[in-house]
Image (cartoon, rainbow, N blue to C red):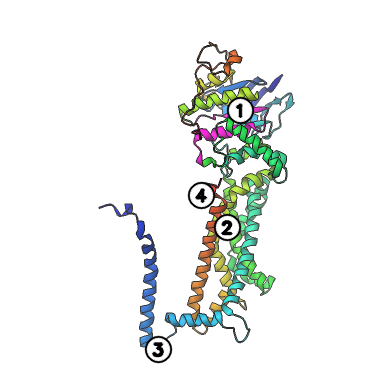
Amino acid sequence: MRRVMNMQPGRARWLLALLPFALIVMVYVVGSAQRRAENPSDKVLPPFGEMSSAIHRVAFEEDKRTGEYLFWSDTGASLERLAIGLSIATALALVLGLLIGLLPIGNAMFAPMTAVMSMIPPMAILPILFIVFGLGELSKVVLIIVGVAPCLMRDLVFTVGSLPREQLVKAQSLGASTWQVLIRVALPQALPRLIASLRLALGPAFLFLISAEAISADSGLGYRIFLLRRYLAMDTILPYVAWITLLAFLMDLALAQLSRRAFPWAHGAEPKA
Amino acid sequence: MSALSIRNVWIEYGSQVVLERVNLEIDAGAFIAIVGPSGCGKTSFLRLLLGQERPARGSILLDGKPMPDEPGPDRGVVFQRYSVFPHLTVLGNVLLGPELQSSPLLGRSFGRRRRALVERAHALLSEVGLGDSLHKYPAQLSGGMQQRLALAQALIRQPRVLLLDEPFGALDPGIRGEIHVLMRKLWKETGVTIVMVTHDLREAFLLGTRVVVFDRLRKLPTEAQRYGATISQNIAVHRRHVPGPGDDGIAANDSDRDDPIAVETPGRDDPTPTH
C-alpha cells in the first residue's frame, strides 16, 4: 500500500472534482424539501424549479416598469463598471509600476507615496467618493480602481525590480536607451506577471463592485441582490450569486488562457515556429 | 594604439580599498585573461570597464577618448548567467541589438529591413551552432547553448571591446572545451578586443594573448581595509606551434595563436545535424 501522499487521482480526477459540488447540491435539495414539508410557503431554501422560473422571469420576460430584461441589463451594467475600472487600474499600475520599478528617480519620487496610499482601506473612502464623484457610475468605477490598482502596481514594481541587473546592463551594452529597455526588456517580462496578479485581483474587484452597487445604484448585479433581499427572494438571489461566480470564474480562465497563448516563454511551453 | 588604457585606477567602497594603482594598456585585438584569487577585485574591474562602476581615482581611455561612465554599445558583455533575455527566442535575442539600433522609438524593425537583419542574425547563429534553434526560447537551451547565444548576441553589434565575466565557469568540462574552440574562432574572425575574467588558469593561458594576475600584495588582516589588490603579474603568452596532421586549420596562418588542446569536432552540446 502506497502512502496517501503518493497516490495520483488518474482518471478519477473529474469524478473527484465533481463530488464536492454534487454533495452541496444534495444537501441543498434535502434541506429545501425538509423546510417545504414543514412550511409550504418557506422562502429561505427554494427548490430548483422555483429558481429556474424566477430566472426565466427576469432573463426572458420584459420588466413591466422599465421594459428591460433585468437579468441582462444588470449583467451589462456590472460588467461595464468592472471593465472600465479594471482597465484603468491596469493601465495606471503598468505606468507607475514600470516607472517605480525601473527608474531610481521614479522610485524615490513615487514609492513612498504609493506605499502609503495602498494602505488606505478602499471601503473607508467610499463615502468620500460618493461625495466627490456623486452617486453615478464614476464613483463605483473609482472605487474599483482605488481598490485594485495598488496591489497590481506593487506586484509590478517587485517584478521589474527583481529583473537581474545583468539583463539591464546587457540591454544597455546592446545600445538600448532607457525607453528601449522599458518597452523591449521590462514591459514584456512584466506582462505575464501583470496578468497573474490581475487574476488574483478579480475577487477584490467584484467585492468592491458589489459593495458600491449595494449602497447606491439603479441597476447591476449587486444592486439587484440587495434590493431583492427586502423581499426574501432567495429564488432570484441564489441564481444571481451563482451567475456572478460563473462570470468571475470565466474571466479568470480567459486571463489564464491569454497568458499561456501570448507568453509561452513564461509557461515553459514550446513556441509556434 | 591601445584600445583600452587604464591609468592609475583605484576602486574604493567607502573606506574599503578594492583595487589600487591599476595600470594596463590593452592593444586592439588582444585577448586579455584576468585571473586572481576570489575577492581580489577581478569582477569589480570588469564592472569598471562596463561603466557600471566609476573609479575613485584614475582614468580609463577607450580608443584614446575618456570612456563613457555607463554601459554602451562600444562594449559588449557576456555574463556567467542572465546574459540572454528569457522572453525572446534565439533569433529575437540576436536581433535585439540591431533592432534597437535601427528603431529608436519602437526598438523593432519590420518588412525588408527586418528581413535583412534576420539574414545577418541567421548567418551568425549558424556559425555558433544555433542555426537549427532559431525559434526556441533560452529556457529550452542547455547552458553551453545559452552562452553561445550570448556571444552571438553581443558580437552582432560589433563592439570595440568584448567583456566576459567567467562566461564558461558554469559549464561542464567537455562543453567548455567546445566553446573555447568557438571563442577563438570568433575572436580571430571579428578581431574584437577581449577582456575575460576567469578563475580557470588553464582557460586563461589557452585563450589569452596576455594573462593579467590581480592579487593583494599586503596580506595582513590589519591591512586588508586600506590596501587593495593590484596587478601583480602581466604575462605575455607565447604559444609553440607544431605543424602537423592534428592542425585545426585556424591556427595555421597565425603561429603564435596556436591552440594545442582544443580540437573542433562535434560534441554533445552541438545540435544534432538535421538532414
- Dot 2, crowdedness within 10 Å: few (<14), some or many (≥20)? some
Distance from label 2 to label 4 (Cα)? 23 Å
Q: Earlier in the sequence, mark 3 or mark 4?
A: 3
Q: Quadrant of the N terminus of chain B?
A: top right
Element marked by disc 4:
helix
- Dot 1, crowdedness within 10 Å: few (<14), some or many (≥20)? many
What segment is highlighted magenta in the picture? B140-169
Which residue, given by chain and number where applicable, does mark 4 sit on?
Answer: A267
Which residue, given by chain and number where applicable, does mark 3 sit on?
Answer: A40
- The answer, for residue B3, to whether it is visible in the render is yes
In the image, which disc is placed on residue A50? none
Which residue, given by chain and number where applicable, does mark 1 sit on?
Answer: B45
What is the x, y in percent for residue B125? 59, 33
Q: Amino acid at mark 4?
A: His
Q: Chain of mark 3?
A: A
Q: Amino acid at mark 3?
A: Pro
Write the residue at 56% across / 50% down: A263
Residue closest to the eye, A19 or A56: A56
